Amino acid sequence: MNINDIPKQYDPKDAQDRWYQVWLERGYFHADPASDKPAYCIVIPPPNVTGALHLGHALNNTLQDVLIRWRRMQGWDCLWMPGTDHAGIATQAVVERRLFEEQKLTRHDVGREALVEKIWAWKDEYEQRILGQLRSMGCSCDWERTRFTLDATCTRAVRRTFFNLFKAGKIFRGKRLVNWDVQLRTAVADDEIYYEDKPGKLWTIKYPVAGSATGEALHVATTRPETMLGDTAVAVHPEDPRYKHLIGHELELPLTDRRIPIVGDAILVDPEFGTGCVKVTPAHDPNDYQTGLRHGLPMINLLNPDGTYNANAGPKYAGLDRVVVRKRVVADLEAAGLLVKEEPYNVRLNFSDRSKTPIEPYLSDQWFVRMADDADGSPGFAQQAIDAVTSGKVKITPDRYAKSYGDWLAEKRDWCISRQLWWGHRIPIWYCSTCSADDLELALGGRSDVAWTEAEAGGWLVCAEHDLKADALGPGHTLTQDPDVLDTWFSSALWPHSTLGWPEETPELRKYYPTSVLSTARDIITLWVARMVIFGQFNMRQVPFRDVYIHPVIQDGQGKRMSKSAGNGVDPVDIIEVYGADALRYTLAAGATETQDLRMPVEKLKLADGREINSSERFEQGRNFGNKIWNVARLVMLNLEGYEPAAVDVAALPVEDRWILAELDATVAATTADLDAFRFAEAAKRLRDFSWGEFCDWYVEFVKGRLRDPEARPVAQRVAAAVLDALCRLLHPIMPFLTEQIWAPLGELAPSRGVPLPSPAEPHACIAAWPAARGLEDAEARATVDQWKEKIQAIRNLRAERNVPKDAKIAPRIVAEGIVADRLRLGEEFIKALTGAATVAVGADGEARPADSAVAVLADAEVVLPLEGLIDKEAERAKLKKGLADLDRQVVPLRAKLANEAYTSRAPAEVVAASRAKLAELEAQRAAVAGLLEST
């Protein structure tokens, strides 16, 4: 190729458009279960088809792609399984909201079939958008195997799992207290609600003791007076002397014609809190629900699914919204003289994460997966999932998250899996209240895909893997399918094996299960990770993955979670458009430390077309790094003209060559270890330090002269080409487009390369072999070059501190002895060239130090820079004096402020600490300037 055809600047868009298509056409992302390569598999946490991906998705998918590309280069048969999640509640909520905003219609207006059709259309649109975003990031998924949680393959797995759970007695239907979203009219999981403290009120109500001749009454405080209509007891502490004599007596329940008992309960009641009397409403409070179970109390449900009160509330309140009922109950209590007092009170409210509306505890019939241990004491689902981690079958990184995983499972709460929605997997249960066991046996007996059991409320529950017809039991009997759908997490809990074709024994399932790694966020450890472990062990008798990596959560500069609604969200597509995919990926990988959160300051950026986007200066770092690599790669390639491959005797190489090869060897070994341990930030930093620091800033500078020398040129070319080759391989998993863009011209200029022996390079970086450490450690070469670098930097610093003109030819002297001096003499020419020196003297301290000189005292040497004739001393002194005065103007008032006890005792501790740190920094600067002034 013509060397001059290599572009002067890296064009991310050109690289992205060019190479992604090549990778797809060559089938580089497609896994082959027939291959004899070892399997490595990651299933993508399927994004919800509710909208576009955000920066958190970009982070997680970048890290997964880093792992996949790295393992692919190591020779593994890699399957990165892509797909999307139907996200039942979230997607239906979005489409319902859109339907109402555009047509003023509810789902009940259009009906189930029409709404589901609209949601499928939404899914098709946004799924393509999501998959397109993943491609634009460079994600090397096996797109031919893309799955969707509602597709035929996943649906078959859902049906089989539900059926097997039903037969095993691990699934049941019962009336339980759940979190109810009155807007969406469905149950939601504990993990799908959030809490906010809101200003509210505390009402104290008088409950008269029935039959009391003295008018005795209990005073009960509550933040929800409207629920008193469903009270079935008032609890007191059994040892409370104020009320002990009343336990077993009855109270007149205000505003009703009912009487309720006074019960003693040491679990619910703290006698030191409030009045020591607690109303018990088992159907509308989780703690009261448990109290009701302990005492066998009735459970009166007051709510309709839409949040209005039902007939159990009495004719005066039935049909009214719960907010209206509260106002009316308070007014009625006051009118009856039963309202003791009303006072302000902060209330912690639960909100649905989906509709953002307050949650109501609601007693309803739901389907549950049983999590507790079996009656015979054998471990249940929860304990089995705990054991999978404690035994080491599944390793969670960082390991602190194993505790939250285990703590949640240890509660062994049954998992509510039914949702009152229309979008999702329909629960495969049919009801019949008229048939008998004989009828069922006659019609369905002998079928392996059907099972049945008696329902708690009477009649029969029939479970089937395949849909049953309404008349399947014959004349006189009708089967009615359960209208609910399964919780989204039910189908996604099957993801590691359903995507591979289970329950069919597919080649993919045989080879890639268990999968290798799951990368995900901490907020779904319980919702998703634990449940995948449960279902993996239930269906497959094996854990679903060996490693779980929990990545940090991206926040803005103030520590707030990014979101579109908060106005601080960053669209990864915008970042790719402005900075390129490599810059996005590198910046995110470099931020993936083991800390819990990744702070990223957000700022507005105006584009050339007038659009304003959210961005962050952090991406500048990724872009600058990519440009640096491109520029140095271009410089190396421009010097490869006439390159001829040949074996290289490493031991005979110049010191700088042996040094860079030793540094490269160490970088290869450490980067491999970092990726193996999911230390993404450390790997990214290490590669930057080696690439920018050792290779770009030092080695290329050392070797420039040899590349211009016809005699030294061939060996220098071979080493430089080999290092650039290895650098592309190391950087490829993080910056795939940039490295592929370098790989192409490098392959034309040096098709066979490597040290000590050259070999033909692979056609693309995407399938290039990951470099292996070759045992090229050279302690002497590394120590020697470290001496050069330290002394060069010291001379540069002295020049900068004393404002020596750039074109001034200096004559530094390095006072050193023994091996230090010997090493420095080897690098005299480099020291001269890289400091702009006319001469460099290295030796023992045999001459007097010039009176007018700058000195740097190092651990093993002294660097002396004569300044005579190089600087205007008076001008320099004037400049230093001005700088000293400027610093004094900052130091003096800050010292006074910190000496003022009124400030240090009253100001926030972090503000005072910041002031002290600032003063220390200014004083250090002042001392340095004063020292320079004294010696000038």
Image: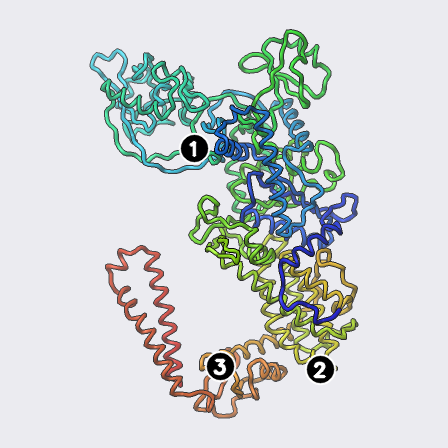
Could you tell me if residue 155 is visible in this image?
yes
**Quadrant position of residue 222:** top left
* Residue kind at label 3, given as amino acid type: Arg
Relative image position of residue 647 (x, y in whole percent): 78, 72
- The residue located at (41%, 26%) in the rendering is 285
The N terminus is located in which quarter?
bottom right
Compare residues 560 and 8 and report the one nearer the observer.
8
Residue drawn at (53%, 23%), measured in percent from left and top? Answer: 366
Position in image of residue 503 (x %, y %): 71, 31
Q: In the drawing, what numbered circle is on residue 357? A: 1
Label 2 sits on what residue type?
Asp
Q: Which one is nearer the viewer's eye here, 919 or 738?
A: 738
**Mark in the foreground, 1 or 2:** 1
Q: CA distance from mark 2 to mark 3?
A: 30 Å
Q: Position of residue 435 (x, y in %)?
A: 62, 9
Disc ID at residue 709:
2
> The residue tagged with tag 3: helix, strand or loop?
helix
User: How many neighbours does mark 3 have within 10 angstroms: few (below 14), some (14-19), or many (20 or more)?
Assistant: many
Q: Is residue 373 visible?
A: no
**Which residue does the numbered mark 3 point to in the structure image?**
799
Circle nearer the N terminus (1, 2): 1
**Near-viewer residue (657 or 413):** 657
Q: Are marks 2 and 3 in contact (CB under 8 Å)?
A: no
Q: Nearer the viewer, mark 3 or mark 1?
A: 1
Task: First in sequence, mark 3 or 1: give its number.
Answer: 1
Q: How many marks?
A: 3
- The residue carrying pointer 2 sits among few (fewer than 14), some (14 to 19) or many (20 or more) residues within 10 Å by Cα, namely few
Q: Earlier in the sequence, mark 2 or mark 3?
A: 2
